[in-house]
Image (cartoon, rainbow, N blue to C red):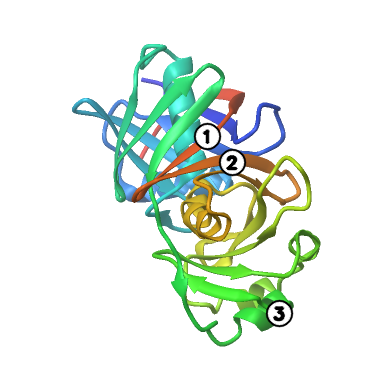
């Protein structure tokens, strides 16, 4: 059977914005090396692989270099593909078995809402080389399960960052979130996300980073529902709602490509 593949822009309602993810709905098991090869060939920040399992799907995410434990935009893209292709009924819930437990997605009109684990950051000393690699002073540094979080003076500082990715690659973490209070009336905070150690110098819009940003900014603002803008070149908005030890992530998605793999072989 020919293997279908999709490319979806997530956390945007417009094509060529947000974060592109490849989605591969599998009909049978594939080995890890094959999935890593496909992800390397797609050369996007993440490629998602879906396999029917029980009352949902097993979901795995690969960057061009490694498999990762949690990815928001590729999960949103995967749910979008399942509904768009009729694999899940229009009003049905998408359930995913992942390395980070069971994740779910529901549709609310054009919106998709993900239910993810919160990954709060605890205060931490910056590791050697981190701030030098970013080239900016920090107002606060924290460490989550996956990433370092660095708050800087302003949204302008976030937008102007030009990290030294070679030096940042030496930091022992999946990635680095840099954030500041927003300077517009639409968003509450802005961020950027850098993960050269995982093979992604800068990720355009990172759902999993917002699992850390949501509790952080909820603590600073006293509000559980917030809007974050990831100020990458592509840009994208993630609406977050903190619900105990979970974070609801809301965004849009749009399919930009559908294809068939020409040589479907291990």
Q: How far is mark 1 from mark 3, CA to CA?
A: 31 Å
What is the secondary structure assignment of the residue under circle 1?
strand
Mark 3 or mark 2, earlier in chain: 3
Do the CB atoms of the residues marked 2 and 1 lie less than 8 Å apart? yes
Q: Could you tell me residue 71's position as x and y percent?
A: 45, 47
Residue appearing at x 59%, y 41% in the figure: 238
The one nearer the camera, 124 or 133, is 124
Q: Are marks 3 and 2 in contact (CB under 8 Å)?
A: no
Which numbered circle lies on residue 238? 2
**Residue at disc 2, secondary structure:** strand
Question: How many residues crowd mark 3 within 10 Å: few (<14), some (14–19), many (20+)?
Answer: few
Reading the image, the residue beneath label 1 is 250
Q: Is residue 28 toward the left or the right of residue 134 in the image? A: left
User: Residue 208 bears which disc, if any?
Assistant: none
Q: Is residue 62 visible?
A: yes
Residue lying at 58% horizontally and 65% vertically, measured from the top left: 196
Q: Residue at x 41, y 46 (%)?
A: 61
- Mark 3, residue position: 137
Q: Left or right: where does residue 80 sit relative to residue 33?
A: right
Q: Which residue, as the protein is rendered here, is positioned at the far bottom? A: 128
**Quadrant the C terminus occupies:** top left
The answer to which of 172 and 177 lies nearer the viewer is 177
- On the picture, is 217 further left or further right than 229? left
For the residues labelled 3 and 2, the Cα–Cα distance comes to 26 Å
Res. 4 visible in picture: no
Q: CA distance from mark 2 to mark 1?
A: 6 Å
The answer to whether 36 is drawn above or below residue 256 in the figure is: below
Q: Earlier in the sequence, mark 2 or mark 1?
A: 2
Quadrant of the image occupied by residue 58? top left
Q: Position of residue 96 (x, y in %)?
A: 31, 35
Which x, y percent locates residue 217?
56, 56
Q: Secondary structure at mark 3?
A: loop
């Amino acid at each position: 059977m020919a293997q279908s593949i999709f490319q979806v822009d997530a956390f945007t309602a417009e094509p060529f914005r947000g974060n592109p993810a490849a989605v591969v709905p599998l009909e049978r098991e594939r080995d890890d090396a094959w999935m890593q090869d496909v992800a390397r060939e797609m050369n996007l920040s993440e490629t998602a692989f879906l396999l029917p399992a029980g009352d949902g799907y097993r979901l795995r995410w690969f960057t061009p270099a490694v498999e990762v434990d949690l990815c928001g935009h590729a999960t949103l893209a995967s749910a979008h593909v399942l509904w768009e292709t009729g694999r899940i009924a229009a009003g049905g819930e998408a359930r995913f078995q992942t390395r980070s437990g069971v994740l779910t997605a529901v549709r609310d009109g054009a919106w998709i809402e993900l239910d993810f684990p919160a990954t709060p950051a605890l205060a931490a000393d910056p590791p050697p080389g981190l701030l030098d690699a970013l080239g900016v002073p920090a107002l606060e540094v924290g460490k989550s399960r996956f990433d370092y979080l660095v708050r800087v003076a302003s949204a302008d500082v976030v937008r102007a960052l030009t990290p030294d990715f070679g030096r940042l690659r030496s930091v022992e973490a999946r990635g680095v979130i840099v954030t500041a209070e927003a300077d517009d009336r639409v968003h509450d905070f802005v961020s950027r996300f850098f993960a050269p150690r995982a093979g992604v110098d800068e990720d355009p819009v990172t759902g999993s980073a917002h699992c850390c940003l949501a509790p952080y900014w909820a603590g600073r603002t006293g509000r559980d529902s917030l809007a974050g803008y990831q100020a990458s070149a592509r840009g994208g908005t993630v609406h977050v709602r903190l619900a105990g030890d979970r974070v609801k992530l809301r965004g849009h998605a749009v399919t930009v490509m559908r294809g068939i793999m020409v040589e479907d072989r291990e």
